[in-house]
Amino acid sequence: MRDRCPIGNLEEIVNDLEGPPVNTTAAPDLAEEFGTASGILPKIQGVLHKYPYLSPLAVLIVAMIIFTLLNERFILATNLSLMTQQTVIVGTLAIAQTLIILTAGIDLSIGAIMVFGQMMMANLVVGSDVSNVAGFGWPAPLAIAAGILIAVVAGAVNGFLIVRFKLPPFIVTLGTLSIFTALSLIFFKARTIQGPEMPETMTWMGTTFKIGPFTVMTGVLVMLGLYAVFAYILRNTAWGTHIYAVGDDPDAAELSGINTGRVLFSVYAVAGLVMGIAAWITIGRVGSASPNVAPNINLDSITAVVIGGTSLFGGRGTMIGTLLGALIVTVVENGLALAGLDQAYRVLAVGILVITAVALDQWIRKVKS
């Protein structure tokens, strides 16, 4: 019902590809030879079904090799550090999107909720001469907590509408996308609050430090920590099992005693929590709070999840795959930029990757269990 994907078990992967030992002394079974699928492709199909993170990992490695050959600056520590920082916003939001897509849902409002949360944080913490809303001059920790709480409530609203009224997630989140985008513009008057206008705590996620030749941003470490936490939750907790079960077959999950409505509601609420944390990270990464930040982040988060091997039909995918998918998008855009290609070609490359990933998922899902 759900796919467990341990990393590093190379021997098991190789065994899956090689298949069972061959008995060279026995006469060949022609009925079996011609009546069932044989060859390396079915074995690869089975391995990719069992370890969905392998395909994005292979794409990432190949892409990095190609772009290094095209421009040796690609592999420099400064450029690698820059790419990790460029990944942090979409990579964090992709965690929330993964949880939702694993249940066979989708969230088009994920970026709008994040923007609304970060604008609320910033406006609550600054003085009345800067902010456009009430509650001026709050302590930074309280303003951050309020922004995260608002994102949780927004996510819970999505979950409530989907569960209570049996509305399609696509339609619900398409509506809340417009609602939260409008609220950000109405409440905050399109006013950008700059980093120097806010306490240092608000931009703490953007602080950097050196590890050898690499520059590491605090927000990147927080993002990686979230990936580790949710990877553990999906693999080792009952809630994680229920998420996969609901996405794989909600009717079967219901018959097995799982409260599918409660699971769906909790997923959207927890996704809101991740959006709230992403809002704080965004303030640090950008160095300001603006209602116009990351206009394409909704689609970018879906792109990262799909390229990372999570099935849009639910029930199959991993957090490590999503992280690899987010890195692939950044690597392709950065590599093509260093190669001197126009932005249009970078968008084209990402589009091809998305279609290829979905086609590959369709092929992998046909594997015989």
Image: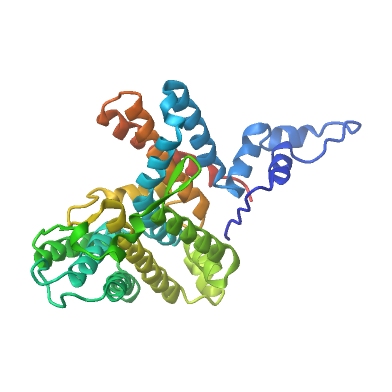
User: Residue 329: horizontal and vertical position, in percent?
Assistant: 39, 40
Task: Pick the quarter of the image with the N terminus.
Answer: bottom right
User: Residue 295: horizontal and vertical position, in percent?
Assistant: 22, 50
Extreme right residue here? 25
Q: How is the image coloured?
A: rainbow
User: Residue 19: horizontal and vertical position, in percent?
Assistant: 74, 39
Residue 169 relative to residue 18: left or right: left
User: Residue 231: horizontal and vertical position, in percent?
Assistant: 53, 60
Residue 352 visible from this viewpoint: no
Residue 107 visible from this viewpoint: yes
Total of numbered circles in the picture? 0
Which sits in the foreground, 273 or 265? 273
Which sits in the foreground, 277 or 329? 277
- Residue 104, compared with residue 365, is above or below; it is below
Which sits in the foreground, 27 or 123? 123
- Residue 277, compared with residue 145, is above or below; it is above
- Residue 363, compared with residue 197, is above or below; it is above
- Res. 267 image quadrant: bottom left
Q: Residue at x 32, y 59 (%)?
A: 107
Q: Residue at x 57, y 59 (%)?
A: 2
Q: Residue at x 52, y 59 (%)?
A: 228
Residue 146 relative to residue 104: left or right: left
Which sits in the foreground, 16 or 73? 73
